[in-house]
Image (cartoon, helix red, strand yellow):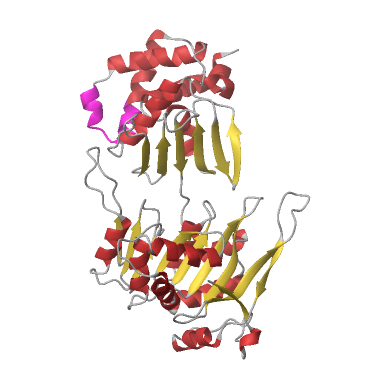
Amino acid sequence: MSLRSRINSPEENGNRGEDGHLVSSYRAKLLEEIDLAEMSSLAAAERRARLERVLGHIISREGPVLSTVERSQLIRRVVDEALGLGILEPLLEDASITEIMVNGPDAIFVERGGRVEQLPIRFASHDQLMQTIERIVSTVNRRVDESNPMVDARLPSGERVNVIIPPLSLTGATLTIRRFPRSFTLSELVGFGSLDEHMLYLLAGLVQARFNIIVSGATGTGKTTLLNALSGLIPDRDRIITIEDSAELQLQQRHVVRLESRPANVEGKGRITIRELVRNSLRMRPDRIVVGEVRGGESLDMLQAMSTGHDGSLATVHANSAEDALMRLKTLASMSEVEIPFEALHDQINSAIDVIIQLTRFADGVRRVTEIALLDSHGSEPYRLATVARFDARPMAADGRIYGDYQHFPLPRRTADRLYMASQPTPQAFGVAQAPHELATREAR
């Protein structure tokens, strides 16, 4: 096998074979010839350029004789090992990959276009995987070891990283890197088939009219992507406070304050929770609050903010249906240290939430808005959800895709009146219900 094929071969890249020895040998020589103190003072791009230049001189001086392509590939592999993330480096540069999942040194999966596939590459050993993990977490001043076997963090470049190692992980060190694509507009999401134009016009009106909106869905259904698109409809004059565990939102308005929670340090101190940030945001004169995800006691503070003058706020929650989203919000709100009866929480949700947008990721990898439901109940009434848009899916077609139709239903009179008062039109595809029986309603408790 030629040197070029050895360098490129995925099956060989993770082995301690001949090419692994070659990369290790040149990596050692490279480290002997560079000044580490000088390197630490350089920016990342300059550091990589310097290493590539020094390694090029070493190869010219000591051999082997290589073609231009082989030489550049060898330099890339050695520098990736010395400076980057080794075999993960090319994956991070591949714009089509949205998630990288490492299940121990021998199993690497990626998600492309909503589909998960295993790659024919692997780490040379568990130690090499751990070195890569340690290099990643060190960039955010964290550590991972048996006393601290879980890390959840955001890299400076924006990716979200989760690490869990033995003894908690029985399959070996596990690394998950979620990459976030550029922000999309609602019009672009229409082009992807995530919703239709009638739903776009309705959602635009609801945001402009300052309805409180919850985006609901399971993991990986595109909640943050949709939240980002919806936030793009907020007027530029509004003061927006965003609150997230890992900063993913990319708002383009001028008056945006971005807050991010902070985990405890290695001594177990300094933790700042989402709940503390939500409470603090209320003292910052926000026009709208956008919470990346409610997952605990901050749900109560968010509900109180929504029902006490901070209309037009947005948040996401993990749930499999609009009904589940209401139940989950009630459960999360009950997790705060403030003891509030479930009945009072029920009334709070009826007062605070206006719209629930349900997202689903289908078997073909496409993420779609499967329901837009308006909460049309008051006070202590049972939750009454009025479905105004729904995606009716058909069985998977021969081409592996799932097709279906978007259905539209009349809006409650109260919603239409509120849109009218905000100078927002009611899209003709929906219309307005003239009587309660015309609504596609259902109750939830």
Query: Visible in this render: residue 413?
Result: yes
Specify start and end residues of the magenta stretch as a single range: 36-50
Q: Residue at x 33, y 72 (%)?
A: 305
Which one is in front, 61 or 13?
A: 13
Which one is in front, 56 or 35?
A: 35
Examine the structure image and report whether residue 47 is included in the region drawn in magenta. Answer: yes
Examine the structure image and report whether residue 93 is included in the region drawn in magenta. Answer: no
Q: Is residue 271 left or right of residue 192?
A: left
- Please name the predominant secondary structure of the magenta segment in the image: helix
Q: Position of residue 85 (x, y in %)?
A: 41, 30
Number of marks in the rendered image:
0
Residue closest to the far right: 398
306 above or below 423? above
Q: Position of residue 370 (x, y in %)?
A: 61, 64
Q: Position of residue 422 (x, y in %)?
A: 44, 85
Picture quadrant of residue 164: top left
Picture quadrant of residue 372: bottom right
Query: Visible in this render: residue 185?
Result: no
121 above or below 155? above
Q: Residue at x 78, y 50 (%)?
A: 398
Which one is in front, 7 or 437?
A: 437
Picture quadrant of residue 36: top left
Q: Is residue 56 left or right of residue 221?
A: left
Q: Is residue 15 left or right of residue 151?
A: right
Q: Position of residue 280 (x, y in %)?
A: 24, 64
9 above or below 277? above
Which one is in front, 404 or 112?
A: 404
**Quadrant where the N terminus lies?**
top right
